[in-house]
Amino acid sequence: MATYLELKAKAEKMMAEAEELRVKELADVINDVKEKIKTYGLTAQDLGLISGGRKKRAAPGSEKAVAKYRGPNGEMWSGGRGRKPRWVTEALAKGKKLEDFAI
């Protein structure tokens, strides 16, 4: 018959093995989900991670600008004032032209 300390050591070893498996499976699941998000072009709102919440009324003259450019993953940009989106700056750094993304 096993002693208390032997059973405790065995249980701790099994818990450590279970945690290792959990971490590995979690990494596999995360990679799978990321791949599917990229493949299908899903957004956080598509997945229900962003609630619709209450809509605020836009101040007169502050309507969103019409998108003029579409990125490689479906990102939209109006080309307006302010910083360029990351996908634009990365594409320009790789030698692409802004006209390549015109809608």
Image (cartoon, rainbow, N blue to C red):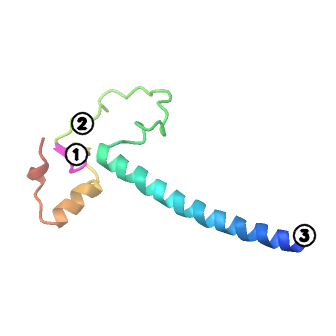
Q: Amino acid at mark 1?
A: Gly
In the rendered image, the vertical position of residue 2 relative to residue 71, given as above or below: below
Left or right: 75 with respect to 20?
left
Q: Report the mark closest to the observer, 2 or 3.
A: 3
Q: Position of residue 5 (x, y in %)?
A: 88, 73
**Which residue is labeled 1 in the image?**
80
What is the spatial separation of the Cα atoms under label 2 and label 3, in whole angstroms? 76 Å
Q: Report the mark closest to the observer, 3 or 1.
A: 3
Q: Residues within 10 Å of mark 1 (few under 14, many from 20)?
A: few
- Asked whether disc 2 touches disc 3, contact meaning CB atoms under 8 Å apart, the reply is no
Name the residue rendered at 31%, 33% in the picture: 62
What is the spatial separation of the Cα atoms under label 3 and label 1, in whole angstroms? 77 Å
> Magenta region: which residues?
69-75
In the rendered image, the vertical position of residue 91 relative to residue 52, given as above or below: below
Name the residue rendered at 30%, 47% in the picture: 39
Q: Position of residue 8 (x, y in %)?
A: 83, 69
Foreground: 34 or 51? Answer: 34
Foreground: 69 or 56? Answer: 69
Q: Any magenta on residue 74?
A: yes
Foreground: 50 or 19? Answer: 19
**Which residue is labeled 2 in the image?**
65
Q: Residues within 10 Å of mark 3 (few under 14, many from 20)?
A: few
The local secondary structure at tag 3 comes to: loop
Chain-order first, disc 3 or disc 1: 3
The local secondary structure at tag 2 comes to: loop
- Asked whether disc 2 touches disc 1, contact meaning CB atoms under 8 Å apart, the reply is yes
Q: Amino acid at mark 2?
A: Ala
Q: Quadrant of the N terminus?
A: bottom right
**Which residue is labeled 3 in the image?**
1
